[in-house]
Image (cartoon, grey):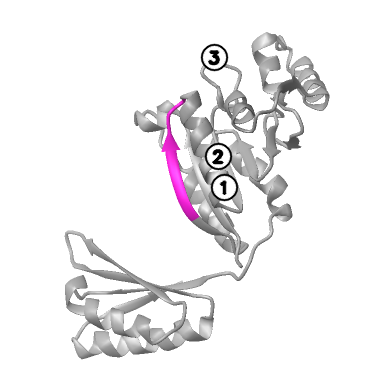
Amino acid sequence: MSSSAGIIIIGDEILSGRTKDTNINWIATELNKIGIKLKEARVIEDEKEIIINTVLEFSNKFTYVFTSGGIGPTHDDITTESIAAAFKVDLEKNKIAMNLLKKHYEKSNIDFNQARQKMAIIPKGSFLIDNPVSVAPGFNIKNVYVFAGVPKIMQSMFHSISSKLEGGIIVKSKTITCDIGEGKIAGDLSQIEKQFLNMKIGSYPYFNPQSFGTSIVIRSEKIEDIDLATEKLIKIIKKYGGQFKILI
């Protein structure tokens, strides 16, 4: 059975449109590389009960859960306390995290005040997730990995734990674009998909001032099946008198 994953993006700033989320796309791409299937991604507000309920739901549904956002020093960063409440564990000042942060702020000549010490408070029994960018760690509790929201920091945290994740069969893909409308080839695409086991074919229309057409993405665990499906697709495009391009 292949591993599955869910992503929870936490933050009112994402929902309000003030900040654009790029973390879902980045994590999804990395998971695909190691054969972990992303099944769901959700953006939620900074509300304790919503965080608790969503984390528990995802933890029960998926092999891995990745959260992003809400672990900074400010009053509205409530992800850590909410996840501790979800799993009914106490919070504690982690000695290793405290030492890392203390040294970091001493070197920076910045006051290591009570607000910044908040970033060393994590649920008891959690494992720290290294943060090579800004030191303040994330943490792992059960099957939940808690990352910062800032993309560069989140990515460094993910890389520090990715080798511990157990993947499965990597799904491969190929994209073919053509100047034929989606509606015209929809039936043919469905027939090709039915000829192969565990193959998915998605079609996505595009429009621009110069032209319109369809981008077709073929996904399968077997590259040889993708190649065969591509050959069949090219024949269909040519049958309709269309032009095509194969993308990597």
Q: Residues within 10 Å of mark 1 (few under 14, many from 20)?
A: few
In percent of the image, x 68 and y 29: which residue is there?
A: 134
Is any atom of residue 98 visible in this view?
A: yes
Q: Quadrant where the N terminus lies?
A: bottom right
Q: Position of residue 87 (x, y in %)?
A: 64, 33
120 to the left or right of 69: right
Magenta region, residue range: 39-46
- Closer to the camera: disc 3 or disc 2? 2
**Pointers 2 and 1 in contact (C-beta within 8 Å):** yes
Disc 3: which residue:
75
Q: Residues within 10 Å of mark 2 (few under 14, many from 20)?
A: some
- Closer to the camera: disc 3 or disc 1? 1
Disc 3 to disc 1, C-alpha distance: 29 Å
**Pointers 3 and 1 in contact (C-beta within 8 Å):** no
142 to the left or right of 72: right
Disc 1: which residue:
60
In percent of the image, x 48 and y 38: which residue is there?
A: 9
Q: Earlier in the sequence, mark 3 or mark 2?
A: 2
Q: Amino acid at mark 1?
A: Asn
Q: Secondary structure at mark 1?
A: helix
Q: Is residue 11 above or below residue 60?
A: above
In percent of the image, x 52 and y 81: which residue is there?
A: 223
Disc 3 to disc 2, C-alpha distance: 23 Å
Q: Nearer the viewer, residue 68 or 176?
A: 68
Location of residue 92 by image quarter: top right
Q: In the image, which disc is placed on residue 221?
A: none
Q: Amino acid at mark 3?
A: His
Q: Secondary structure at mark 2?
A: helix
241 to the left or right of 87: left
Q: Position of residue 236 (x, y in %)?
A: 26, 87
Disc 2: which residue:
56
Residue 42 magenta-drawn? yes
